[in-house]
Image (cartoon, helix red, strand yellow):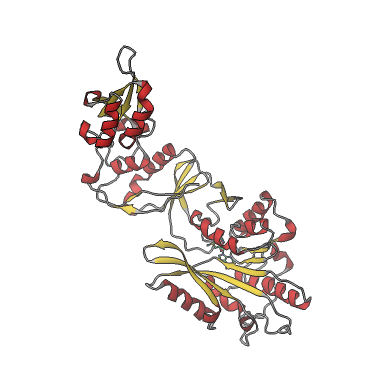
Amino acid sequence: MSIFREFFRKMSSSSQPSLAPVGVRGMKVLDREKFLRNIQVPVLYLKEENLSIIFKQCRPYILKIENFKPIMDLQANSSFNKCIYLHPEKVTQWKDIDEESRNVLQQFGVTEKNLTSEEVQLGYENWSYDTIFKAVLPEDEEVISGYSQIGHIIHLNLREHLLEYRQVIGQVLLDKIKTCRTVVNKSNIIDNTYRNFSMEVIAGKEDYLVSVKENRCKFEFDFSKVYWNPRLGKEHERILGFLKPGDVLFDVFCGVGPFSIPAAKRKCTVYANDLNPDSFKWLKHNAEINKVDKRLFQPYNLDGKDFICYVFKDHLTKLCKRNTQFSGKIHVTMNLPAMAVKFLKNFKGLLKDEELTDKFNYDIVVYVYCFAIGDDSVAEARQMVNENMKFDLSSFITDIFDVRNVSPKKEMMRVTFNLTKQILFDGHKSCAPVEPPAKKTRTTPQTTMTAL
Ligand SMILES: C[S@@+](CC[C@H](N)C(=O)[O-])C[C@H]1O[C@@H](n2cnc3c(N)ncnc32)[C@H](O)[C@@H]1O
């Protein structure tokens, strides 16, 4: 999977390379013929027996563009039988080649006389998508120079001023990126419950079923219905690095399983939960295609609050009551950065009514994610966690980590803290005394109790 960080830059006519298509600025319907261009290119003649040494010396100057061979055969009657095409922006005269290389070339009979030029016709197939976008899209404006790829889908987030060019942008990406079959443009920001977003197909087939690989597992899902962010692969890997065989993972907002499935494959016992019925469906599918041991994996389709107040609580209660010797760690991942901190209060006093204080002796680590928008992201993340827990967690926090920069003033942060006896048996309880979700909710939720 290719992932490029999306960044924007200003273009100006002065920075436009001379080796670029001309006369295509403002094109809104792709016309590939218009990209034909004749260019004078420097050429170096040589004998085949010296090719490898001369090619090595000329490497920095070679004309490297798509679908173009920089080494060609010459007519048999010439005293030279090979030629190398050089880049016209790098070499216009013999002295443009550095002195050391020129000396080596001369030792092999290649002098200024061997440097000539030739008219070469370049076309659509020779330009990279980046060069095409620079030539077509408005000058002196921000242009897109990156994209995310999820399986066969290329996913863009085009600025308003580029929307009228979306068909050209989509078609060029489809032509140039061999593994791409569909190009979509995000048409809203992620603000719905399930963190997926509506999208418009701007080129290729309307096919949202993707297959991706992450952390040695395969994930299949409908990208239009669930959350998946290829930029989180590294963070998933970091968390997996904290898990040991025999540990337990409670994944409160699991999506289609990027924490849960690899964790179960590493022999952790996993309780994976997501409120989105589509995530739940693909989560189970992914458990199957990755041949996850069913005894180690329990999927749930509950609100995060219910998952904490019943499934998590039930597990701890049973551990204590049965006096189970358990020396591993219990991990709780909460990746719903816009809201996860609001679920923290459900841990407070969770075991208060149980007569288990003496029996509780377990290591529980919570990884909760949030967004920070201020100048001091670490302080902001700490404050959010403390305020929402209504408990000063400072001495239990073991790490506050900047996961990624989401936008110029927005960081995704992870706060790691130990969920201690003091918190779980605190006198103040937050889980409302409601009926536990019916058994069936392990596969289909009966009710979605208001979360907070
Ligand atoms: C940001 S995604 C994270 C998915 C996955 N853990 C990952 O790292 O890619 C958050 C997930 O939380 C789910 N979600 C949103 N609100 C929820 C709630 N109240 N209870 C449980 N899951 C919820 C969404 O459906 C979504 O799949």
Residue at the extreme bottom of the image, as rendered: 427
Q: Is residue 274 visible?
A: yes
- Quarter of image, res 104: top left
Nearer the observer, 43 or 66: 43
Total numbered badges shown on the rendered structure? 0
- Residue in the image at 43% along x and 54% along y: 187
- Quarter of image, res 343: bottom right
On the image, the x and y values in percent for residue 143 come to 32, 49
- Residue in the image at 59% along x and 67% along y: 333
On the image, the x and y values in percent for residue 399 come to 51, 72
Residue at the extreme right of the image, as rendered: 322
Does residue 316 appear left or right of residue 393 in this picture? Answer: right
Ligand 1 shows up in the quarter that is: bottom right
Does residue 160 appear left or right of residue 275 in this picture? Answer: left
Q: Is residue 254 visible?
A: no
On the image, the x and y values in percent for residue 326 come to 73, 71
Residue at the extreme top of the image, as rendered: 77
Nearer the observer, 76 or 376: 76
On the image, the x and y values in percent for residue 136 come to 30, 41
Question: In the picture shown, does residue 367 fall above or below 58?
Answer: below
Does residue 215 appear left or right of residue 247 in this picture? Answer: left
Figure quadrant of the C terminus: bottom right
Does residue 98 appear left or right of residue 418 in this picture? Answer: left
Nearer the observer, 367 or 31: 367
Question: In the picture shown, does residue 112 fall above or below 5?
Answer: above
- Quarter of image, res 41: top left
Nearer the observer, 325 or 127: 325
Question: In the picture shown, does residue 270 fall above or below 375?
Answer: above
- Residue in the image at 35% along x and 24% along y: 50
- Residue in the image at 56% along x and 69% along y: 367
